[in-house]
Image (tube, grey):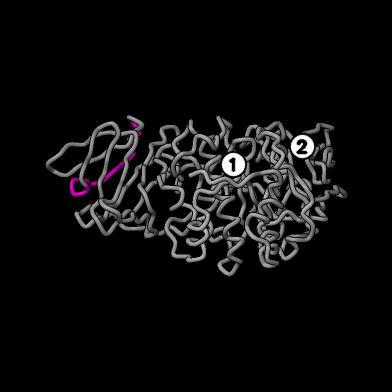
Amino acid sequence: MIRCNFCQGIKRGHSHRRRAVMSGLLTVQVIATSVLVVGWWSVGCQPTTRVSSARIDQLAREPMIRVRIAQGVRQLSLDADRSLHITTQPDGSHRVADLLTCRWSQASKRIVLDPGASGRSSEADQLTIEVEGAGSLRVDGQPYPGRITLVAAPTRGGFDVVNHVRIEQYLPSVLDRELYSHWHPNMFQAQAIAARSYAIAEKARTLHRHFDLESTQASQVYGGQTINLKALEAVRDTRGIVLTYEGQVLCAYYSSCTGGTGQDAAIAFPGDPDTKPLRGRRHGTWGSECKYYRWGPITRRAWALSRRIAAWGKRVGHPVARVGRIASITVTRRNSVGRPARFTITDNAGRSYQLDPESFRLSCNFQTTRLSKLASDARLRSGHVTVLVSDGKVRFTDGRGFGHGVGLDQFGAQAMAKQGHAAAAILDFYYPQARLVAAY
């Protein structure tokens, strides 16, 4: 996951259902039998199953990116200044004036398109919605470039909403959501290159599904079109430039603050290759202006933490689902710069379970309706922490950083930019041995 700890969430409103007209206003209604439960990776930072890599010599033109902006949708409002065009798969094309409603069919597990009185209903696995000409499409009031696709989710009910957008149109919104507006232009340029590299690398890894990236912290935060001039200029000035290593586009992870020591991608994200530019290294005090450069102590009750970790394990299918009351938590492996690489949890029955640092952080912060709400000041900000279990309590001390700690430290990069370092120097510091290449 690319983690931003100061970005704004995407606000979605609710609209009354209205008949579609030629002005471009459309309301989509889904009748679903169940509400999607967000997968654990959506609130953490585990990457998707690896499929392939993005070779720099195969990038001849600007890529399209598929961003999932909503999932398990039950109702959605779409409108535009120009006429909308609806395409169903595999049933052909419909003008928006003929469209009444779109609903989920539990019987057929497909989206049902009900046209006007002159037509007949048809079924489709997905709908593609585009604005005629160069206009933008508003989803619940927020404009998005490109086109919107609604994809049926048969096993869950309802559908996913996916924005298909050219990467150079996608990136300004990412910078707008990931960075403070007053930060240095050099930091915006460094972030643009890292975010572009990450998106292209992830796209190559996710060919097996109907989207490449989430619009949340599960990937990098995206909210449609933006008027942030600094973000727009940084993307324009770095157009097509990516980080590469050994002929491949680098999956340039970044986090809010590393706390002075970086994590290895192969440790934070099991299944990732051990890539030299993405190994943990000492970052010094560059990121010390971050609120969470140092954090803690935090004290939690052992039995309550045990329940939370077990619930996380049950959700993701990890053996720790069977953990009893926690008796001890120890760091049993560290990376080359001393950052925890493995936690071992032992319960009062003597059973031990091993977790990588990101899984440990996610499990300690896991939230469901069956668990008491976890206060913000009780959440672990990273997996770089010292843990002591004593007298029925778990005490977390010497916490460092916010996020997974792989790659660029956003607060550290901003400090470097303020000191006059250019984007290329910032990226060279956080991704050593990576090369900057103009891909298109």
Residue 126's tag is none
Nearer to the camera, 110 or 402: 402
> Residue 376 sits in which quadrant?
bottom right
Q: Residue at x 71, y 49 (%)?
A: 405
Nearer to the camera, 340 or 396: 340
Q: Residue at x 64, y 39 (%)?
A: 245
Is residue 24 shown to the viewer in this render?
Answer: yes
Residue tagged 1: 41
Disc 1 residue crowd, few under 14, some 14–19, many 20+, Cα 10 Å: some
Q: What is the x, y in percent for residue 19?
A: 22, 53
Q: Amino acid at mark 2?
A: Gly
| C-alpha separation, residue under disc 1 versus residue under disc 2 | 24 Å
Q: Looking at the figure, which quarter contains the N terminus?
A: top right
- Give the structural element (helix, strand or loop) at label 1: helix
> Relative to 272, does residue 117 appear above or below in the rendering?
below
> Residue 246 sits in which quadrant?
top right
Q: What is the x, y in percent for residue 203?
A: 51, 39
Q: Is residue 61 left or right of residue 183?
A: left
The span shown in magenta is 96-107
Q: Is the Cβ of the residue at disc 1 closer than 8 Å to that at disc 2? A: no
Residue tagged 2: 324
> Relative to 329, does residue 78 appear above or below in the rendering?
below
Nearer to the camera, 109 or 336: 336
Q: Is residue 65 magenta?
A: no
Q: What is the x, y in percent for residue 21?
A: 20, 54
Q: What is the x, y in percent for residue 384?
A: 77, 49
Q: For the view shown, which residue lies furthest in the bottom direction?
A: 182
